[in-house]
Amino acid sequence: MIVTNYIDTDCIVPQLKAKNKADALKELTHLLFESKKIRETDMAQALDQIMARESTESTGIGRGLAVPHARVPGLKSLLCAVGRAPKGLEFMAVDRNPVHLVFLICYPPSEQTTYLNFIATVSSLLKDPEHLQGMLDAETAADMHGVLEELSGTLSHIGETNGDADLETDPEIERTPDAHADLVLLARLQLCQEMLSAAKTGKAQIRKRMENIRSMIAPRILNHYDRLMKSYAPALVAVEGDTCQGCFMRLPSKFVQQVRQDPEHIHTCSNCRRYIYVV
């Protein structure tokens, strides 16, 4: 995923005025409205959701990153505003460290997989300390946008219909036992399947991309994913406010916190057995 496809330069704030989490969330949500990305009613709905979620669990995912998000029915596509706090904001992040970069995301219900893929990609891109430092050192909004574009620019577009595109190798996927990497792969595979269902052209290349992704996933994980997609699609869903977005059952808060703090394992919903991703 090229994350800058969802982030405009005018929705990046190199220096947040806010001095605390609540004001930062308001500042970035208002920025989406001021830049005419969302309507005032959608802005109010998004802000209410984001504030409610943050009051029960932080979206600070560690390493100085936070990904507050809201599902807004009135939107046509995913949108993101980025704010930087050089001195850091107290966010009650999972690693208890201050947050320096806030990616505030609004997305329509139909793009849940896109939203999962977006968060997974941002997390992967900035997992490298040097990449993160590049975002912190960039001077302007254009520079920050350029850093993100450069980091994700080498990644292939899923379902690209360029007949000359080389789909035999995928530079954004590596064989690794890391559970987070497996979740990223599952998110991309699920997104490919949704694109295949909607595509009118380029289906052969999407299928080839899916084959490449599947070859990188452990057979045990892939078998369970296939069973879920056959009977209970989608196979990978978010957990929001302790509620599984697949079966809409509330999960024990202690379990959700355990999932959030345990990057070494892939977890499933105790009710519907779907793979879950907590942010």
Image: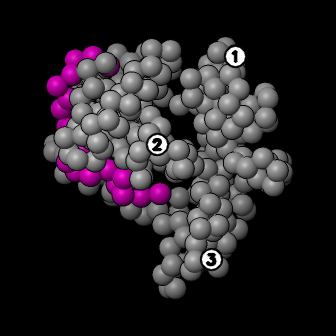
The three-letter code of the residue at mark 3 reads: Lys
Q: Which residue is mark 2?
A: 73
Q: Residue furthest bottom?
A: 163
Q: Is residue 10 magenta-colored?
A: yes
Percent coordinates x, y for residue 161 in the rendering = 51, 78
Q: Classify 10 Å Cα crowding around label 3: few (below 14), some (14-19), many (20 and above).
A: some
Q: Secondary structure at mark 2?
A: loop
The residue stretch that appears in magenta: 1-21
The three-letter code of the residue at mark 2 reads: Pro
Nearer mark to the viewer, of 2 and 3: 2
Q: Which residue is mark 3?
A: 203
Q: Secondary structure at mark 3?
A: helix
Q: Earlier in the sequence, mark 3 or mark 1?
A: 3
Name which residue lies at 35% across and 37% down: 42
Q: Earlier in the sequence, mark 1 or mark 2?
A: 2
Q: Are marks 1 and 2 in contact (CB under 8 Å)?
A: no
In front here: 17 or 61? 17
